[in-house]
Image (spheres, rainbow, N blue to C red):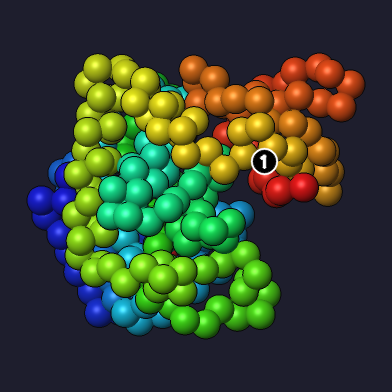
């Protein structure tokens, strides 16, 4: 992973570029750009990706697994990023399934995109955005977003990328080659920002207050409803928010 890196000064979106070239690239090719002019977030949102302020990167993956097992790669990415940042001295937590947070605010988002046939994956594009040096966020997101620099961490982007790729390689190959999720689940639980807390599950217009109990063997969230019943939440279907 990351042996071949294609870098840009500016590009529309590293995920879009990765999708264009994915068929002709080997697994692990990584696209980075100083700036994205149309950075994309989940649910069609815009992702602020100004020049030199962050890490905007996409990794092309070609896992030999059935498509329904692909969403777990997002958890692997979140776990790798949290592990890497904690190793670099940043107190980092994971807000299941795919936000990485520092001091309660989001510093990293993950956008996983899949191209698959019925039984096999053509490619996965794993997009990672990390706010590293951003000082100012627009008013809509300033209460929920932050950067490493704003939280008092002055890290080099190259060091952060290297550390993430190292952790990701281990957890990803465990999953792909050994079918092992153990370490990823351990990291997701240890660094969880929400286990034991009350959260809102947001789905369309609906919101439901529940208590978050655990992350199960499949990487799904186990929550307890007000009436005491237990429910399993599948990643990708919901958003969550603290009480
Ligand atoms: C989120 O909504 O939390 C996901 C944000 C993902 C942003 C990254 S930046 C690199 C890659 N290219 C994109 O256009 N988006 C992802």
- Which quadrant of the render holds ligand 1? bottom left
Quadrant of the image for the N terminus? top left
- x 46%, y 33%: residue: 190
Residue 13 falls in image quadrant: bottom left
Q: Is residue 203 visible?
A: no
Label 1 secondary element: loop
The image position of residue 60, as x and y in percent, is: 27, 47
Q: Is residue 140 visible?
A: yes
- x 73%, y 41%: residue: 199
User: 187 or 31: nearer the eye?
Assistant: 187
Left or right? Give the position of 5 relative to 41: left
- x 57%, y 43%: residue: 193
The image position of residue 154, as x and y in percent, is: 31, 72
Q: Which residue is mark 1?
A: 238
User: 76 or 42: nearer the eye?
Assistant: 76
The image position of residue 24, as x and y in percent, is: 18, 49
């Amino acid at each position: 992973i990351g042996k071949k890196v294609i870098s840009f000064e500016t590009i529309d979106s590293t995920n879009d570029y990765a999708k264009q070239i994915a068929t002709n690239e080997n697994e692990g090719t990584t696209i980075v750009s100083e700036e994205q002019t149309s950075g994309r977030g989940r649910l069609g949102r815009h992702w602020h990706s100004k020049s030199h302020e962050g890490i905007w990167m996409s990794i092309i993956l070609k896992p030999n697994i059935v498509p329904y097992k692909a969403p777990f790669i997002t958890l692997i990415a979140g776990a790798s990023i949290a592990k890497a940042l904690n190793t670099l001295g940043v107190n980092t937590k994971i807000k299941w399934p795919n936000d990485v947070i520092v001091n309660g605010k989001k510093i990293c988002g993950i956008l996983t995109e899949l191209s698959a046939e019925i039984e096999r994956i053509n490619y996965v594009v794993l997009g990672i955005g990390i706010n590293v040096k951003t000082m100012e966020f627009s008013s809509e997101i300033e209460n929920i977003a932050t950067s490493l620099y704003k939280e008092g961490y002055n890290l080099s982007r190259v060091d952060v990328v290297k550390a993430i790729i190292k952790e990701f390689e281990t957890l990803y190959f465990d999953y792909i080659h050994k079918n092992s999720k153990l370490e990823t689940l351990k990291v997701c639980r240890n660094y969880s920002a929400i286990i034991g807390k009350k959260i809102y599950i947001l789905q369309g217009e609906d919101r439901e207050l529940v208590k978050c109990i655990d992350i199960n063997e499949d990487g799904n969230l186990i929550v307890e409803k007000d009436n005491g019943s237990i429910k399993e939440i599948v990643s990708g279907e919901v958003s969550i928010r603290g009480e």
